[in-house]
Amino acid sequence: MNSKISFQIVFFLFFAKSIIVSGQENEIPNNFDLMDLKEKDVEQSAGQFRAMDRDNLTPININNASRQELSSLNLLSPFQITNLINHVTKNGPIIHLAELQTISGFNATTIKALIPHVRIDQNELINVHNFKKQLLTSEHLIITRVDKILQEKKGFINNDFQGDRNRYYFKYQLKNKYIVAGVTSEKDAGEQLSFKNGQKGLDYYSAHLFAKDLGLIKQLAIGDYKVEVGQGLNMWSDFSLGKSTDIIQIKKNARKLSPYKSTNENRFLRGVASTVEFKSISLTSFYSRKKIDANIIDTDTTDSEPSYSSYSASGLHRTINELENRKTLSETIWGSYFAFDKRTFHIGATYVNTAYRGNYERSISKYGGFQLNTNKNSVLGFDIDFSYKNIIAFGEFSKSIDGGIAYLASTLINLNKQLTMIVLYRNYQRNYHNHFSNSIGENSNNINEKGFLIGFESQFRNKFSIKGYYDVFNFPWLKYQVSAPSFGNEIILKVNYRFKNKLQAQIKLLMKNKFKDLASENNSIRNLSPIYSRSIRFHIVVPISPTLSFKSRAEYKLQKFGNDTHDGFILYEDLVYRKLGSPISITARYMLFGTDNYDTRIYTYENDLPYSFAITSNQYTGSKYYLLIKYRINRKLSTWVKYSAINYTDKDEISSGLDQINGNRKSEIKVLVKYTF
Amino acid sequence: MQLRHLIFIPAIIFFVSNETYSQDFNLFQSSRSSAIGNASVALIDLWCINNNQAGLALINHKTIGLTVNNKFLISKLNNTSLGIALPTNSGTFGFSASFFGYSLYNENKFSVGFGKKLSKKISSGIQLNYFSAHSASENSRRMTLVGEAGFLFRISNKLIIGTHLFNPTYNSKSNNTKLALPTVLRIGFNYNFSEKVFSYLEVEKNIESKNRFKSGLTYQPNNVIRLSAGISTNPTLIAFGFGIAKEHLQFDISFMQHQVLGTSPQFSMQYEF
């Protein structure tokens, strides 16, 4: 199977699991609308989420926060960030948060949303070099977690799964101003606790030691880390958001290096990396070597180099087959990034080399005809970013040494206080190869796509906002299940209204047109047919009292393909109880869903345990509920319990293959304990 | 490349086949209008003549203009329009002549329009058009007389709503001598965010095809330059434009991008006496 399909399929399977991310405790930045995530993002988010993966668990210091830190809050537009930095440079540190009102582009809504996440700390400016003191004031964090699905999957009944039914997760982290260090480990349900074949107890371990601001050495990573540069075209090992309704936040602010703390078992770098900075010039170098999972097709031991057909991304090692593929392929990644930064101008150059020790023998397909065929790849590229008055322009270019090119260019214009526009053009050639490309696009990989996007965001008096985009894209070559060059377009529009009594109402519309193969009886010639998707969503947040609020949502989706029209809907009611000073907080949901088939499934975000979030796809007919309770035992120790259950009315078995559950009910319990000191 | 062209040829034939093509109401509009995705029912300039004649009432000076529009960089698909607006005491008259095509296939349009202010806030306009289409292969010359009318409502200093109806007397069949044109109803508005930012939105219902949604934006960083961008659905179009207005002269160029068929460039100029 081709690596691209297997990649996608694996991520679909991944829904069965909740998605673990490292980062902030259950708090999603206010205007960061996870519910906006599109299917592609959901597929890609399996590993971790940048928005929640902020280094700072504590509020950031607004007076010396970098552009990257500010943008990682997902609360400020690029213009607001520029204005804030200019304000601090020009007028000195901000003394009181009320001062924010005087900065252009900051309104009451923004400031309200910002306050919990920022602080003003002038002492820090004085103590900046007290390294010893910082070490002593480190924050420590220990997390343990157990999950269990109460119904037995087929893989357990048949004894195909080698391990027990619990999922275990453990994490330790130390953090101070200069250092982040920690260990993350995990065992998925069905994976065994074993000390054989190189496994040491649990299935997955990750450790990181990350230091920053050590004189000339701006960043130093030892162990597991992430690399992100430019706009994500040349190198972005982290998962990243694609298009979303918050379209003017589309510009990425790369952190260069950052520690890796998540549980995606394949997509990260393991080795050493550093960023050396001298005045406006910085040089980031990284080297990584580790073993990843791959589907080995030739296990001939006489040949020192195995043959593999695809990279496996699920990180699941439950069956003998999965265990055979575990850490079979040696991967080496190295490269460097050279950057020149002025306040309003940035330029960077990237080189990345990726090599696998083995013979890549992927299955031949027409649509994959231009994809990478070898076990080696290298890319060379540059990125530019500058701002002038009310305009921000950015772009990135990348060339794969033995393949094609890819580039994107975009301009953001702040037309007036109420209106911001963006235009973005992208062109990713069909023979462009890059394992770590993660930039904006309609396809899940940055290949075989040309597209043009116009987006806007408009805000009227803190009350009413409207945003959306229109994206037009062409695919010059075939795609999976699309047996001819094709094209499509997408419109998204979201209107948000905030009433006087804090009631919030939201309407979101989506229209998308693409092409797909019509199923044909003989396999010879496939015809394309347009696939039209329409969806409408109403979402209301009703605060009953300061401690209790309701959230209601109705979403309807219609899909027309060939002669068939299918639809789906969901309806849910959320209750959130959170009282200041009370040790208990409760989140609960009751949801009904009904869809004609899998294609009309509707995604919903649900609250989950800290350091994770879950996006579930809802298909077929049934009901679902969950109850999440947090209990704070004392200042240092807290615990969370979540119970969730789905009942289908039209199914006697859930899932398929080894994941199949007999019966129409699936329920799960999760427990987490967090200790900080 | 060969394969791709093969796919496009039927699409081009379909798109420019005389039946379909003459029905594209937006063919005769100016490049300032094209640049905002033709969301121009409430746009006021000389080319109200081919757009919404109610706008004629708001033209206070004698104006003459020319616009040349090419479709998909195919040399035989050119449209040229000449227009004149003559304000009088009772209202403004508009005259225009348009030519599209080449010797084997061509279309002409001659129009006389009149726009008048009904009150401070309401203006209206009407127009009579003579259309003719000549096809050498069918050895035919088909023609028709078509009327159209529109209104503009100034709701506030920032908001103008426009509506326009083309060819209310719909006649569905063409024959060898009679040219049939569809009825087109448009409604839209022009909202000024500020003195620099103008937004346009329009919905077009053509009786013979799908609803079109159009939207555009013009940004005028100063009094001379204007930059525009627009979109339009069914078919999917993206447009850009650049314009200069200096004293009596206005000059605009625009590019409209069709997803499959490619680029359509256009330029317009007008001179105000």
Image (cartoon, coloured by chain):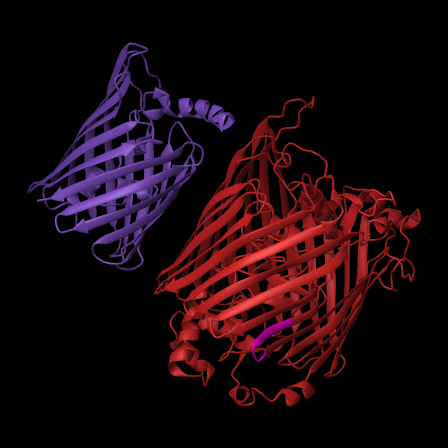
Q: Quadrant of the C terminus of chain A?
A: bottom right
A310 versus B158 height, above or below: above
Name chain B's colour. purple
Q: Closer to the camera, A329 or B18?
A: A329
The chain shown in red is which?
A
Residue at far left of view: B89
- Quadrant of the rendered image containing residue A182: bottom right
Residue at far top of view: B139
* Magenta region: A214-220
Q: Main secondary structure of the magenta part?
A: strand
Q: Position of residue A275 (x, y in %)?
A: 58, 70
Please indicate whether residue A100 sits to the left or right of residue A605 in the image.
left
Q: Quadrant of the N terminus of chain A?
A: top right
- Asked whether residue B77 appears in the rendered view, the answer is yes
Question: What residue do we see at 67% from left, 62% from top?
Answer: A287
Please indicate whether residue B71 sits to the left or right of residue A205 in the image.
left
Q: Position of residue A328 (x, y in %)?
A: 81, 51
Q: Position of residue A87 (x, y in %)?
A: 40, 77
